[in-house]
Amino acid sequence: MPLTPEQTAEIEAARANPRPTLRAVSEGMEAHLYRAHPVLDHGFIRVIDYMGDDSAIVQAARVSYGAGTKHVQNDEGLIRYLMRHWHSTPFEMCEIKLHVKLPVFVARQWIRHRTANVNEYSARYSILDREFYIPEPAQLAAQSTVNNQGRGEVLTGEESARVLAMLKSDAAQMYDHYEAMLSQDGQQGLARELARMNLPMNIYTQWYWKTDLHNLFHFLRLRADPHAQYEIRVYAEAIAACVRDWVPLAFGAFEDYRMGGVTLSSKAIAVLKRRLAGEAVTQEASGMSKGEWREFVEVWG
């Protein structure tokens, strides 16, 4: 269960106490504020706070461009122009703070996005809960034979059951030892900061993660991509659903130009021009590596 009854009651109490404000408010994001969106078996994401909306992006851009722009382009057109031409600072005017509960191995992948402020639950001061990420059978896959970072065929039958049993038993045993090392029964007990080193990577941690919209879009472009690891992708997809309601114009442009767009190398452009001219081009004649050619064919056939 992602939330305890006490946490649920706390969220409902916060949502039941709205306050008047003069700040810009996104009605779409207000619907998400404080609520927990379940992710994986024990995880969640919650929007704790946010700043700005689509109008904040437009306002910042028009300050930098000077007077008169507003009469030339509407808000959506301006936002799409900014996204299309890779402008960044106007999108940095919006910020979001999230409360995330996630497996440690996902957190270690996530933290590589260094353009955020993070405060993580400390196992030096507190004892971690007995909660582990155990994949659904459909997520137990073999190593990909073509992608060193990806998954291949899903494990089935006895092999799937064997792996699942090991994941469960190893996590349980490690936590048992963790508790035993912390025990005060007839002994002093090991310090929490040392006992934690024996815990598995699939145990859950929590943090507050604050970032601006520009860097959040970069995170979503990489982590909500179908090629991203499943366990971090589902978090990115849950966040994306909130962002879509928060800044619908900016998110629409992001989907169009980033998630749905393709960046072409000069070699790929040359191949497309030759194809349009009716020429059949092979990988050898393209000048691309096998990996580049495979990715090119996936998009263009």
Image: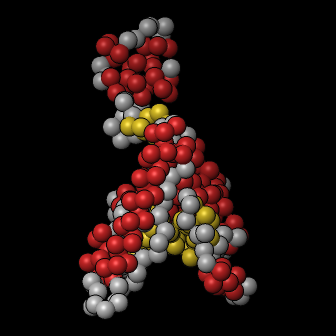
- Residue sitting at 45 percent across and 68 percent down? 204
In the rendered view, does 169 fall on the left or right side of 17? left
Give the x, y percent position of residue 62: 54, 63
Query: In which quarter of the view is residue 87 placed?
Result: bottom left
Q: Is residue 157 above or below residue 127?
A: above
The one of 222 and 249 positioned closer to us in this rendering:
222
Question: Which quadrant is home to the N terminus?
Answer: bottom right
Above or below 159: residue 10? below
Q: Is residue 284 above or below residue 170?
A: above
Residue 21 vs residue 295, the one in the foreground: 295
Residue 153 horizontal/vertical position (percent): 47, 33
Question: In screen coordinates, is 56 left or right of 112?
Answer: right
**Residue 134 appears in the figure:** yes
Q: Nearer the viewer, residue 154 or 210?
A: 154
Q: Residue at x 34, y 90 (%)?
A: 184
In the displayed structure, 155 sits above or below 192; it is: above
Residue 270, image quadrant:
top left
Front position in the image: 188 or 151: 188
